[in-house]
Amino acid sequence: MEKKLFLDDIRNPIDCTYYISSGEIYLELWDIVRSYNEFIDYIELNGVPDVISFDHDLADEHYDMSVYSGPIGPDVSEFTYDRFKEKTGYDCAKWLCNYCIQNAIPLPKYYVHSMNPIGKENIEKYLENCEKAI
């Protein structure tokens, strides 16, 4: 049986079936972690799962969309993660990539179920680049 890890501060896997094209996978059994620290602890204790689904926003401060926006709208070029005190799903993706490289482990299959379009793209691009580096 595949081991699946779901990273999200609020939702459960079943909550993601309606707006993700691969939603049917969220009806399966998942282990759930709610924060950056839980994510790391889980992997260090259980190893890298077969599948990980990432949310980006893991704390109240991450839901303030004004930090992602410029004067006219979303401005990714102006966005930096140092605006946050709490770690995001993007930080989890970076940690996972480093962990896999250091331990010579391939990245697991992954999904990004975040409703934050900038955060979702950041996680996807980071993991795509990591796959190329491994």
Image (cartoon, rainbow, N blue to C red):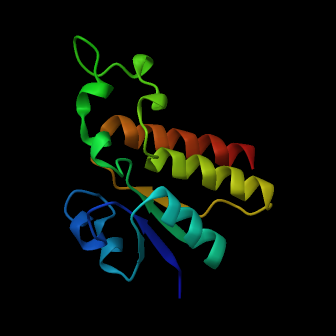
- Residue 108 spot, x, y in % from top left: 60, 64
- Residue 46 spot, x, y in % from top left: 62, 78
Instruction: Name the residue at the left extreme.
Output: 18
- Residue 57 spot, x, y in % from top left: 34, 47
Q: Is residue 104 left or right of residue 73?
A: right
Instruction: Name the residue at the top extreme.
Output: 71
Q: Dividing the picture into quarters, in which one does residue 106 lie?
A: bottom right
Q: Is residue 77 left or right of residue 17?
A: right
Toward the viewer: 51 or 31? Answer: 31
- Please tell me how many numbered marks the rendered image carries: 0
Q: Residue at x 29, y 15 (%)?
A: 70
Q: Residue at x 58, y 44 (%)?
A: 128
- Residue 47 spot, x, y in % from top left: 65, 74
Above or below: residue 70 compared with residue 119: above
Q: Is residue 97 left or right of residue 109?
A: right
Q: Residue at x 39, y 64 (%)?
A: 34
Above or below: residue 60 compared with residue 70: below
Q: Is residue 45 left or right of residue 52?
A: right
Q: Is residue 47 visible?
A: no
Q: Is residue 16 visible?
A: yes
Instruction: Name the residue at the front extreme.
Output: 85
Q: Residue at x 23, y 11 (%)?
A: 71
